[in-house]
């Protein structure tokens, strides 16, 4: 963590401010993730209950606190308030705190706080709607190029990418890899591939973290995605087996249902959103990228056989 000596006594204060600011931004992330898929404005109307349509007063819209005070229910109609709201707020708060602890008071701090908030929106919108917002990725790609240019001019800012060529290479490699995977899947398996949302997302991530970041993100996200995917398939198979046992008296009908269940399971498994895994890989690489690369080159025999130039 880099904190100027004059600000060191305020370290705890900045930690609290970072977390609180993150929770406030997380409240806005909830708005974006819920309204963008429906094509609604994130500015108007003001926050309101989805069932009774009553506007939410400011004192009922305090991140984390209001959800606890209200007992996770709307004050007017007692409709349960989804756990997603406090989760997103707390998660964004923790990420903002981690950015401060990792980068300190530097140019990188506000840049990567916004970056983390964007990935929170991407994650929860993709999980809920299976879409990745263009409102994040399309402006994010040129912004990442601009930030790399700032990093080149001001290398003391602790930005991960300080070379526009590295950012451009990351954009092209990130978007190109996912696009190629999508085309190969369509041609060989005759099934939908990754989707253009993932193409634009990894292109944006490549702009912020460089071409080595793209490789790291794909490696991390593939491992995590494989583990979770296998776990979900096993859970679904166990559930299908339980259903088959309960209906053993109607064997023909049960067999047909089991086949349908297996087909549905494979279809659901195929459409598991990949955006959250890419976002997780990007966050891990953002905070631990240098350490991951250093550990990689410390493996015996790799350093002398791997033609990689670190950014």
Image (cartoon, rainbow, N blue to C red):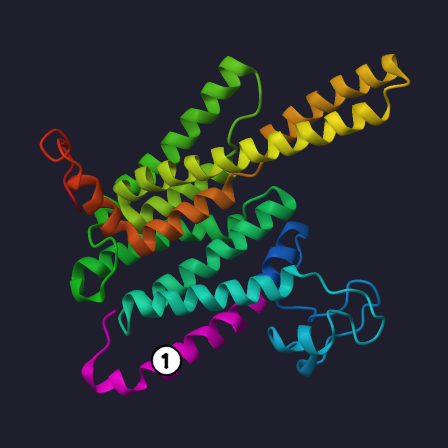
- Picture quadrant of residue 271: top right
Residue at label 1?
A: 14
- Picture quadrant of residue 67: bottom right
10 Å neighbourhood of mark 1: few (<14), some, or many (≥20)? some
Q: Which residues are magenta?
A: 1-28
- Residue 21 spot, x, y in % from top left: 47, 75
Pick the quarter of the image with the N terminus. bottom left
Is 252 on the left-hand or right-hand side of 18? right
**Residue at position x 32%, y 41% in the image:** 216
Name the foreground residue: 167 vs 279. Answer: 279
**Label 1 residue SS:** helix
Q: Is residue 209 visible?
A: yes
- Picture quadrant of residue 147: bottom left
**Residue at position x 17%, y 66% in the image:** 156
- Residue 3 spot, x, y in % from top left: 24, 76
- Residue 228 spot, x, y in % from top left: 53, 38
**Residue at position x 47%, y 43% in the image:** 277
């Amino acid at each position: 963590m880099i904190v100027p000596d004059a600000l060191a006594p305020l370290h705890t204060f900045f930690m609290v401010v970072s977390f609180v600011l993150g929770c406030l931004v997380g409240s806005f992330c909830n708005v974006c993730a819920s309204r963008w898929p429906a094509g609604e404005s994130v500015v108007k109307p003001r926050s309101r209950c989805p069932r009774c349509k009553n506007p939410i007063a400011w004192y009922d819209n305090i991140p984390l606190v209001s959800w606890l005070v209200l007992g996770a229910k709307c004050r007017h109609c007692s409709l349960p308030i989804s756990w997603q709201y406090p989760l997103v707020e707390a998660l964004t708060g923790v990420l903002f705190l981690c950015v401060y602890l990792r980068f300190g008071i530097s140019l990188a701090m506000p840049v990567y706080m916004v970056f983390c908030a964007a990935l929170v929106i991407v994650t929860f919108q993709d999980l809920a709607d299976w879409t990745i917002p263009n409102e994040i990725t399309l402006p994010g790609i040129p912004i990442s190029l601009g930030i790399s240019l700032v990093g080149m001019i001001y290398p003391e800012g602790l930005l991960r990418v300080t070379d526009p060529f590295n950012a451009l290479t990351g954009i092209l490699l990130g978007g190109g890899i996912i696009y190629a995977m999508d085309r190969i899947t369509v041609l060989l398996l005759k099934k939908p591939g990754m989707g253009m949302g993932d193409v634009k997302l990894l292109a944006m991530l490549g702009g912020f973290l460089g071409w080595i970041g793209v490789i790291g993100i794909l490696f991390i996200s593939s491992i995590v995605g494989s583990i979770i995917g296998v776990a979900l398939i096993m859970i679904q198979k166990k559930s299908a087996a339980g259903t088959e046992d309960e209906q053993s008296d109607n064997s023909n009908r049960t067999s047909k249902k089991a086949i349908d269940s297996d087909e549905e399971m494979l279809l659901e498994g195929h459409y598991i959103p990949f955006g959250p895994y890419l976002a997780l890989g990007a966050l891990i690489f953002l905070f631990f990228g240098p350490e991951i690369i250093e550990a990689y080159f410390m493996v015996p025999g790799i350093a002398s056989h791997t033609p990689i130039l670190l950014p």
